[in-house]
Structure formats: C-alpha cells, structure tokens
Amino acid sequence: MAKRSIVLLLVFAMLAVVLTGCGQATGGKRVGVTMPTKSLQRWNEDGANVKKALEAKGYKVDLQYADNKQETQNSQIENQITMGCDVLVIASIDGGALGGVLEQAKKKNIPVIAYDRLITNTQNVDYYATFDNYGVGKMQGEFIEQALGLDKGEKGPFLMECFGGDPGDNNAYLFNQGAMDVLQPYIDSGVLVVKSGQTKFPDQIAITNWESKGAQDRMDNLLTAYYADENIDVVLSPNDSLAQGIVASLKSAGYGTASKPFPVLTGQDCDKINVGQIIRGEQSMSIFKDTRILADQVIAMTEAILEGKTVPTNATYNNGVKDVPSYNCEIKFANKDNWKELLVDTGYYQLSDIPGAQ
Ligand code: BGC
C-alpha cells in the first residue's frame, strides 16, 4: 500500500511539473511572435529560429504570419495580448501603423521588441533587435565602387539603375541611404549615369512589399525604355527578392552572353535561389545576415526583460518620437568566393538546399 502511494505521489508530482511548466526558469512565460509573410524565405527562417530558441529556454511561443497585411498582423497582436503573452516580438509590415494595437499592449504593461524592422511613431516600443541596416546599404555601394574600379579612378561612364524596397519598411530607407552615400558623388560627377533619371527613394524606385514580380516589371520597363541600344552595367538592388526579379528580367532581355554580360548586381539575405544566381554569375554579391544570431539576441533581450536584468544593447534608433535602445547584429559580405564557407560550413544551409550547388 505504502509503495503504491509513493508511486501515485510521484505521478502527481511529475504531472504538476508538466502542467505548470515548473522546473524551468521561465515559469512557462508566453511570447507572442509576429512575422510579416511566409512568401519570402528569410521570414520563415526567422520565425522558426526564434520559436526554436525560445522553446529551448522553456518559453511558450505563439508564432503568426500576416501575409504582408498590417491589419492582419495587428489583429494577431491583439489576440496575443488577449491570450496573455508576457512579451511581444514583432517584425512589422508597415512600421508606422501599429500605434493603436501597441497602446493596448502598453495598458497591460507588455514589453514590445521590434524585430529586424523598426516600429515607428509610437512610444510603445521598448527595444529593437536588428542588423546594421545602414551598413548593408554602404556595403552594397562600396561593392559597386570596387567592382567598377571607381575607387581607383575609373571614369566610365557606367550605366546604372537603382531599386529600393517597400516604403512602409524603415529598413528600406536605411539601405538606400547607406548605398547612396557612397554612389551619389559618382552620379553627380557623371561617372555613373542613371539613364532613367530615377534615383529618388521612395518616390521613384520603391517596390511594394519587396515583391520579385514588381522588380521584374520595373526592370522590364527600364530595359525597354532606356537600354534598347546599350547594355546596362550596374543595378543597385537592396535585397535578394528584388534581385530575383531583376535577373529574370535581364535573362528575358537576352543578358548572359559574351556581348551582353550580366550587369554588376547587388543583393541581401543570401536566399537559396540567390546563392544559385551568384554561383551562375547572374548576381554579383549578397549580404549574409545570420538569423540565428538575431534570434539569440532576441532571446537574450526577452530573458533580461522578464528577469529585470540589464537588456543588452549596442545602438539606438530614433523612431520619430523616441530613441529606441537597440542591438545591431553583424552583417557579412558574400560572393562566389566565400558563400560555401559562410553558409554551408557554418551549417546555415545544406549544400543540397542551394539550387545548382551540387
Ligand atoms: C529585411 C531584409 C529583407 C526585406 C524583405 C527587410 O526589412 O531587413 O532582410 O530582404 O525586409 O523581406
């Protein structure tokens, strides 16, 4: 009889641990994570990495994707507030359109971490974890400068067109600023010639929702209108989803031959398709933003917030109404020479993930 009671007691004790999440430092706290869309590779990885890393620490995670619609994301966040989330991690779509829902978070004292993209024009964002976004644009600009030998005094003139990201995404402004701070002097001196005259972000060069199709259509139009008789030498693309559309357009216009070589083309994210493009010589470079590092940083922030410790930060970003304490993760240059070392040797991808790499 005594033996049976001990067994029963043990069973109850184990059940209690499972049900309350006790035995874990986090006490089963819940984190609401919202991501913009499943349609681009990186956000799937971001969501999966953050969820996995939080769960490994014992947190419960509600992960939602919003099909690039801010209203959808706002109702997902509202649900997470109602469900009693203790922290909100938000990769926004239109960073300036979350004010209302974040008022509700504030009323319930739920801390908010902006993920990768800054949430603007509200007091109710506590921290921001991202990569060095201005640095991304600067790296792209400097790559073009070196690839064409502009820094060595090459005078060209080289024919260039510029693309920008989604106007609702604060990062898109920073990428553009970083690149143009390097390239604008060469445009001003006539070494780089933008035949369309379209250089202004967002008015002239933004691509809604960062869609490849939008970039492809714009590139088609530019090639038809301005490059019927001359080859284009350079395309500034802020990221890989745009670079995919640009390459599709260049291919259909006959680029990729000895008399019509692919132009110098930048990118960002090291999406699998784009690594394939780099291997085939269709895209010149990309920027590797290791989303595992960003996930770890967000977990470190979440833990520090919930344990009342100092939150790790190394930068601040002004969101229009306040300086948001932030953490900038490191970015890395990737091209045909180092993609394997950066992406495969570190276990970020399997070789078999990359089209054309086998
Ligand atoms: C991210 C980029 C990404 C783009 C499109 C930006 O906010 O920082 O890495 O390529 O959104 O999803």
Image (cartoon, rainbow, N blue to C red):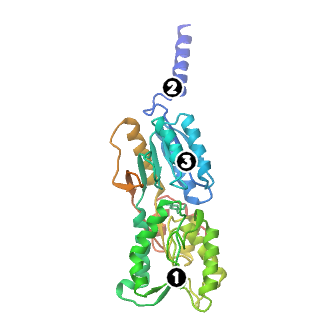
Amino acid beneath label 3: Thr
The residue sitting at the top extreme is: 1
Q: Of label 3 and label 2, which has the lower sequence position?
A: 2
Mark seen at residue 34: 3
* Nearest-to-viewer mark from 3 and 2: 3
Which residue is at the front of the view, 353 or 90? 90
Depicted 270 relative to depicted 27: above or below = below
Q: Gap in Å between the C-alphas at discs 3 and 2? A: 29 Å
Q: Secondary structure at mark 3?
A: strand
Which residue is at the front of the view, 83 or 173? 173
Q: Gap in Å between the C-alphas at discs 2 and 1? A: 65 Å
Residue contact at pointers 2 and 1, CB within 8 angstroms: no
Q: Which residue is painted at 63% across and 54% down in the image? A: 67
Amino acid beneath label 2: Val
Question: Looking at the image, can residue 198 be seen?
Answer: yes
Residue 252 position, x and y percent, is: 67, 80
Q: Which residue is painted at 49% across and 41% down in the image? A: 103
* Nearest-to-viewer mark from 2 and 1: 1
Question: Which residue in the structure is indicated by mark 1?
Answer: 197
Q: Residues within 10 Å of mark 3 (few under 14, many from 20)?
A: many
Q: Which residue is painted at 56% across and 7% down in the image? A: 1
Question: Which residue in the structure is indicated by mark 2?
Answer: 17
Residue contact at pointers 3 and 2, CB within 8 angstroms: no
